[in-house]
Image: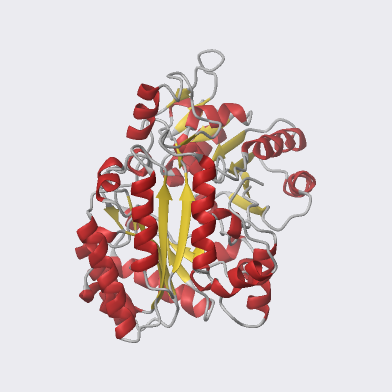
C-alpha cells in the first residue's frame, strides 16, 4: 500500500525539534513492505495547501498524521495546537477522497480518545506505535476491521464522546526497533542550521512517580533498555553522516538506571565517537563524579537537569524521589566538572507553583538559583503545572475543586498554588531575570527575536543550544525585549 506520513509540528521555539517518532514509524512501515512518503510541515509556509499537493502527488491509500503536542504547557503564554491539527485532518480526508486518516504521536499518549475525536480522525494509535501501525495497515490492506489491533483508538465507537481505546502495545525488547533514519525522510539541514540536534532514544519508561507527570502512564514504570552496543553503533553512524552535529538523548531519565548508563557510556567510548552529545532528563538522584568523568570522555557537551524545585517540602509534594541532599550533590558534581576544565554546559529546569507552594518555598528555590547554581549555567523557570489525566496532581486538583471530575483536560489547565498571587510571581521572576542573565522563561525562548539569534549564530558557524544562550538573552535585555507576563 501507499502510505503518506505527515509530521504536523510547526513550533520552532525555543529550537525546532525534528520528528523522531514519525520518522521511526516511517522506517518500520517501509520495512514492512509499504510504499512510504513523508511530509514534514515544519518549514512549509502553507501547510494545508502542501498536504493537498502531496496527496495529489502520492495518491496514498492511508494518510497518517503525527501530532506532537496538545499545547506548549505554558501557564502564562499558552499556545494551543489541536485546531491546526484538525484542519490538517480535514485537508487530508478531502484531498485523498475519503481514504483512512490515522493520527498518532505523543499527544495521543496523553489523551488517545479525546484527541482522535477532536481532530476528526478516522482512527488513532497510542503507545509504542512501531508494531501497532504495521498491524493496522495489514488489517486495512486485507479488508478487515483494524479496531481490534492493540493500540488502536476508535473515536465515538459507543456514541458521541465514548471512545474505544484498546490496550496499548509496548515493545519490550527495544533492540528490534531500527534506527529512525531521520535523514532519509526529511531535510535535516534546516534543523541543524537552527541548532536542532539529531535525536536518539536508548530506553523507554520511567520508575519515578512525580505527581504531575504522565510518562509512567504512557511508557510504563519499568525501564525497557536498548542494547548499549546497538545504541552506540547508531550514534557512530549518525556522527559520521552529519559531522559536528549534536546528538541528543531523549530518554525520560538518562542517568537512571545508572548501571545501564555506565554500560552505554562505555560502548560509546569504545567506538571513539566524535560528536557533541546532549541529554535531557538528567535526574539529580543519580549523579557521581565517575558519571561526570565518563560523560566527558564520551563527548557530552550539554546536560539538562530537572530538579523542578529546591525546597525539601516541595520535593515531597511533587513526589520527586530525591531530596535537597541529592540536589546539592548534583551541584557539587557540576562544580567538579568545572574544576576539571570540562566543556560541558548545564541547563537547570525549575517548575514552580505546585501544591503547597508558598512565597517562602518559592524564595528558597530562587535563593538556590542565585547562590548555588554556577553563574555560567543556564536556568529555565516555568510557573504553573499542566494537569494531565490520572496523575496524582489531577486527583488532587479534583479533590480541591479546581478541576471538574468529568473534565478530560484536553484544553490546557494549569495548577497554581492558591497561596500565590500571579503579580507577586511576575515581580519575583523579573527580579531574577534582572539580577542574572542566565535565568530565562518560556516567554524569552518564544520571543520572535530569539530564533533570529539562533539563526545568526548558526550562520556564523556557532552552535547555540539553549545552554549557550546568555549572549542572546543579554541582547534581548539591552533592547527591552524581555518579560514574563502573558502576551
Query: Of residues 246 and 315, which is closer to you in this image?
Result: 315
Horizontal and vertical percent position of residue 302: 42, 72
Query: Of residues 208 and 475, which is closer to you in this image?
Result: 475
| Residue farthest bottom in this picture | 341
Q: Is residue 27 visible?
A: no
| Residue at 40% across, 82% down | 343
Query: Of residues 79 and 184, which is closer to you in this image?
Result: 79
Place residue 217 in its image quadrant: top left
Place residue 402 in its image quadrant: top left
Q: Is residue 418 visible?
A: yes
Horizontal and vertical percent position of residue 301: 42, 76
Label total for image: 0
Quarter of the picture holding the N terminus: top right
Horizontal and vertical percent position of residue 192: 60, 71
Q: Is residue 130 above or below residue 300?
A: above
Q: Is residue 428 above or below residue 70?
A: below
21 horizontally vs 172: left or right: right
Rendering colour mode: secondary structure
Q: Is residue 102 above or below residue 230?
A: above
| Residue at 45% across, 74% down | 237
| Residue at 68% across, 52% down | 41
Horizontal and vertical percent position of residue 369: 38, 63
266 horizontally vs 45: left or right: left
30 horizontally vs 218: left or right: right
Query: Of residues 207 and 272, which is closer to you in this image?
Result: 207
Amino acid at each position: 500500500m501507499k502510505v503518506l506520513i505527515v509530521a504536523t509540528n510547526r513550533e520552532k521555539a525555543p529550537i525546532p525539534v525534528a520528528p523522531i517518532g514519525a520518522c521511526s514509524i516511517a522506517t518500520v512501515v517501509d520495512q514492512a513492505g509499504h510504499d512510504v512518503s513523508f511530509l514534514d510541515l515544519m518549514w512549509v509556509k502553507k501547510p494545508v495547501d502542501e498536504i493537498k499537493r502531496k496527496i495529489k502527488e502520492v495518491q496514498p491509500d492511508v494518510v497518517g498524521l503525527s501530532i506532537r503536542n496538545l499545547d506548549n504547557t505554558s501557564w502564562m503564554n499558552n499556545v494551543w495546537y489541536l485546531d491546526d491539527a484538525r484542519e490538517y485532518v480535514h485537508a487530508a480526508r478531502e484531498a485523498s477522497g475519503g481514504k483512512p486518516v490515522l493520527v498518532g504521536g505523543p499527544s495521543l499518549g496523553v489523551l488517545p480518545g479525546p484527541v482522535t475525536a477532536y481532530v476528526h480522525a478516522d482512527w488513532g494509535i497510542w503507545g509504542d506505535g512501531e508494531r501497532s501501525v504495521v498491524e493496522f495497515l495489514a488489517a486495512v490492506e486485507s479488508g478487515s476491521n483494524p479496531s481490534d489491533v492493540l493500540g488502536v483508538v476508535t473515536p465515538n465507537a459507543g456514541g458521541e464522546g465514548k471512545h474505544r481505546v484498546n490496550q496499548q502495545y509496548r515493545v519490550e525488547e527495544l533492540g528490534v526497533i531500527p534506527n529512525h533514519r531521520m535523514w532519509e525522510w526529511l531535510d535535516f539541514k534546516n534543523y541543524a542550521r537552527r541548532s536542532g540536534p539529531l535525536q536518539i532514544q536508548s530506553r523507554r519508561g520511567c520508575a519515578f512517580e512525580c505527581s504531575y507527570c504522565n510518562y509512567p502512564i504512557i511508557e510504563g514504570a519499568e525501564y525497557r533498555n536498548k542494547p548499549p552496543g546497538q545504541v552506540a553503533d547508531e550514534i557512530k553512524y549518525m556522527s559520521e553522516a552529519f559531522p559536528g552535529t549534536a546528538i541528543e538523548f531523549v530518554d525520560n531519565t538518562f542517568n537512571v538506571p545508572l548501571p545501564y548508563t555506565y554500560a552505554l557510556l562505555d560502548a560509546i567510548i569504545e567506538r571513539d565517537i566524535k560528536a557533541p552529545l546532549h541529554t535531557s532528563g538528567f535526574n539529580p538522584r543519580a549523579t557521581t563524579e565517575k558519571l561526570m568523568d565518563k560523560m566527558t570522555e564520551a563527548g557530552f557537551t550539554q546536560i539538562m537537569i530537572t530538579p523542578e524545585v529546591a525546597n525539601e517540602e516541595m520535593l515531597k509534594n511533587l513526589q520527586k524521589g530525591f531530596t535537597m541532599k541529592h540536589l546539592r550533590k548534583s551541584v557539587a558534581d557540576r562544580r567538579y566538572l568545572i574544576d576539571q576544565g570540562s566543556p560541558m554546559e548545564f541547563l537547570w529546569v525549575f517548575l514552580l507553583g505546585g501544591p503547597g507552594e508558598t512565597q517562602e518555598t518559592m524564595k528558597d528555590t530562587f535563593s538556590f538559583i542565585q547562590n548555588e547554581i554556577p553563574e555560567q549555567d543556564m536556568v529555565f523557570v516555568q510557573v504553573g503545572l499542566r494537569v494531565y489525566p490520572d496523575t496524582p496532581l489531577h486527583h488532587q486538583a479534583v479533590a480541591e475543586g479546581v478541576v471538574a471530575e468529568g473534565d478530560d483536560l484536553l484544553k490546557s489547565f494549569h495548577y497554581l498554588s492558591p497561596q500565590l498571587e500571579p503579580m507577586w510571581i511576575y515581580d519575583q521572576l523579573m527580579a531574577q531575570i534582572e539580577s542574572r542573565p542566565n535565568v530565562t522563561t518560556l516567554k524569552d525562548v518564544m520571543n520572535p527575536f530569539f530564533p533570529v539569534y539562533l539563526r545568526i549564530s548558526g550562520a556564523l558557524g556557532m552552535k547555540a543550544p539553549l545552554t549557550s544562550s546568555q549572549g542572546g538573552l543579554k541582547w534581548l535585555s539591552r533592547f527591552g525585549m524581555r518579560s514574563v507576563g502573558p502576551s
